[in-house]
Amino acid sequence: MVTGPIQQPSTVARPAAARRPRGTLLGDVQALARALAVPPGEPRWRERLIVHLGPVRQGFAEHVRVTEGPTGLYAELLYQAPRLDRGVRLLAGEHTAIAAAIAALQHAAVLPAVPAEEVRAQAGHLLRALDRHRRRGADLLWEAYQADLGGEN
């Protein structure tokens, strides 16, 4: 049980690769969404989608490295706020599903036989999953820090 206030997660001990500028993954996801918004009949639509999917895949893999593991953000959160175990397990479980959705979209996008509508549907599913994951993570962090800072009259 933690009796003192929860300290915000540190970034000092994280490797340089894990200290990407804040918002980079979000920017990559937004670029993918813009590429998806272009009508599939446009020349090189699939190629643009694949190009924008690469940074999302890389950024998400980095997100997983930073959050999971014995020295990750989730371990730090659980150390300071064990009550968040369920939420942390939910987020960690989403990592597998999102990585699989990224791989499936990559596979579908490179196959010309896969209809554009199916590729768009998979991409839409991925974008919604990433948005849900981002919101759940933000909510979990808010819960961790708000619970210890709030409550004053």
Image (cartoon, grey):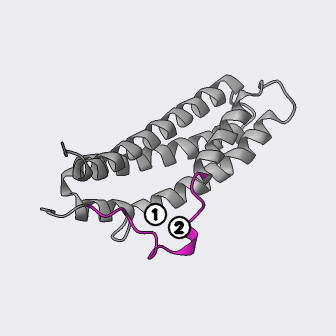
Q: SS class of the residue under badge 2?
A: helix
Could you tell whether 89 is left or right of 19 in the image? left
Check disc 1 and give the amino acid type.
Answer: Val
Q: Residue furthest right?
A: 43
Question: Mark on residue 74?
Answer: none
The residue sitting at the front extreme is: 153
Please, what is the three-letter code of the amino acid marked with disc 2? Answer: Ala
Quadrant of the image occupied by residue 133: top left
User: What is the x, y in percent for residue 13?
Assistant: 44, 76
Q: Position of residue 2 (x, y in %)?
A: 16, 63
Residue range corresponding to the magenta coloring: 6-23
Q: Residues within 10 Å of mark 2 (few under 14, many from 20)?
A: some
Q: Image quarter for residue 78?
A: bottom left
- Judge by depth and name the residue closer to the eye, 79 or 117: 79
Tags 1 and 2 touching, CB below 8 Å: yes
What residue sits right under mark 1 in the picture?
66
**Number of labelled discs?**
2
The reply to whether the magenta stretch includes residue 22 is yes
Mark 1 Cα-neighbour bin, 10 Å: few <14, some 14–19, many ≥20: some
Identity of the residue drawn at 66% across and 53% down = 55
The answer to which of marks 1 and 2 sits earlier in the sequence is 2
Q: Which residue is mark 2?
A: 18
106 in relation to 76, above or below: above
Q: Residue at x 26, y 52 (%)?
A: 149
Q: Is residue 17 magenta?
A: yes
The quarter of the image holding the N terminus is bottom left
Q: Is residue 95 above or below residue 21?
A: above
Above or below for 12 versus 3: below
C-alpha gap between disc 1 and disc 2: 6 Å
- In the rendered structure, the answer to whether residue 89 lies left or right of residue 82 reads right
